[in-house]
Image (cartoon, grey):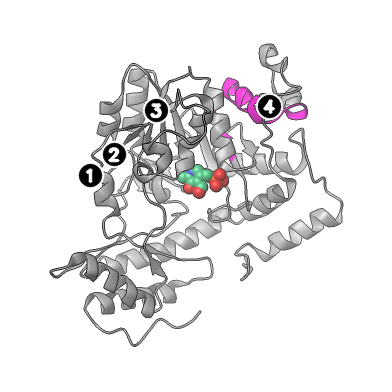
Amino acid sequence: MTVSKTSGIGEDTIEEVARYLGRGGPLSIGDGSGIIERLERRLEDLLGIRNVLTCSSGTAALHSAYLALDLPTGAEVVAPVTTFHASVTPALQCGLTPVLVDVDPDNGNMSPSALREAITERTRCVVVTHNLGHPVELDEIADICREHGLRLIEDCSHAYLSTYRGRPVGTVGDIAVWSMQAAKTLVAGEGGFLATEDRALFERACLAGHYRGRSEKQIADPALRAFADTGMGLKYRLHPLAAVIAWSEAAHLVERVERRQRLLTRLSSRLEKTPGVRPPVVHDDVTMGGWFSYRPTLVPRGDDPRAAFERSVDALQKAGVPAHRPSIGSLDSMPLFTGPPPLRHATSTWRPRLCGPFDGARAYEQDRLSVTVTAADDLDRMEAYADAFADVMNGWSGSAAVGAR
Ligand SMILES: Cc1ncc(COP(=O)(O)O)c(C=O)c1O
């Protein structure tokens, strides 16, 4: 697989898009046929999932998932405080209200005990994110959901090909959702999809964002089919060119993920032996799949650990390691979760409940940095990064920097 240096996607993908345009492939597909259907079948085969519905973004797929669950107005959705906002914000559009709970300090995943404590008589749904590719404690969380009659959405956007106790993520919850936005392991540019074993949920998700052709073709339930002409008023179909990109890129997904695993496992095994650095924790019963982002923790020493952390990040950058503080904070710091929304829509239903203090989230975030590792990197580069970490953490000035790529 040759990767384009400018876009990060395969050279063959660029040719595939040109071929599609050259032969006059349709630029709008309303009935889910052609490249849309081919992509969906490929995703099902690759990820071990069924009834895939592609959408214009991961956010659109999440909105469709919440609509498909058809929950009563004001129902509570329990979500981890550490996730991308769109895991839960589409619930705002469905008259639901979020309940944010704490996470495991090791991996930023929803804490099952925090979930248990947050459940009330209004709770109807739980959304989990397999944070940065590390699967959540799916068995325990699914047990809690069963016990309390709650629906479970798995947000797998970071976790392409991750497994939990030998099972692919996305196969335990009622609905699973993936983003194919440009930074994800599988790229459409903008795009997303959902998958569910439950045909009734698929049909409702289809009606949510795919009026006419696709709803007429794929909805069997006459009570829903009667609305196929308009659907629920949204248009969430995937752009065919995005589908071509994702279809072509999906052919390389396993190879890409295996390569990334090799690189990051090597980096972790070196950082494990470096004083002052803790590589990301990976539990024994999971695999990290596409490992969305590599985030070790520094253990800064001295009287002023904050300043020591900043100095270390600076020194790593000077030594050529693409390290930076993660740019997105947790949801408890965001205005949409801390005050009334700025538009009147849903002010009476969206009443975020923050089940703090979020000690797990704070411990997870503390002294964590993100190291960018791309498809253009190799094992030698991982060794060079590890050498730079060792030098910086040993207080060395870092003059023998990682070479330019
Ligand atoms: C965990 C998670 N969920 C959902 C989304 C939303 O996906 P999209 O950007 O495709 O709408 C993202 C995107 O960054 C994400 O990281």
Dot 1 amino acid type: Asp
Q: Which residue is mark 2?
A: 102
Residue 217 visible, this angle: yes
Crowding at mark 1 (Cα within 10 Å: few <14, some 14-19, many 20+): few
The label nearer to you, 1 versus 3, is 3
- Disc 4 under 8 Å from ligand 1? The reply is no
Q: Would you place residue 262 above or below residue 218 in this image?
A: below
When asked about the image quadrant of residue 369, the answer is bottom left
Q: Which residue is mark 4?
A: 233
Crowding at mark 3 (Cα within 10 Å: few <14, some 14-19, many 20+): many
Give the alpha-carbon distance from disc 4 to disc 1, as whole Å: 41 Å
Q: Estimate the x, y position of residue 214 in percent, counting from the top left.
A: 74, 29
The label nearer to you, 4 versus 3, is 3
In this view, the residue in front, 289 or 165, is 289
Dot 4 amino acid type: Gly
The numbered mark at residue 351 is 3
Q: State which tag comes first along the sequence, 2 or 4.
A: 2
Residue range highlighted in magenta = 193-214
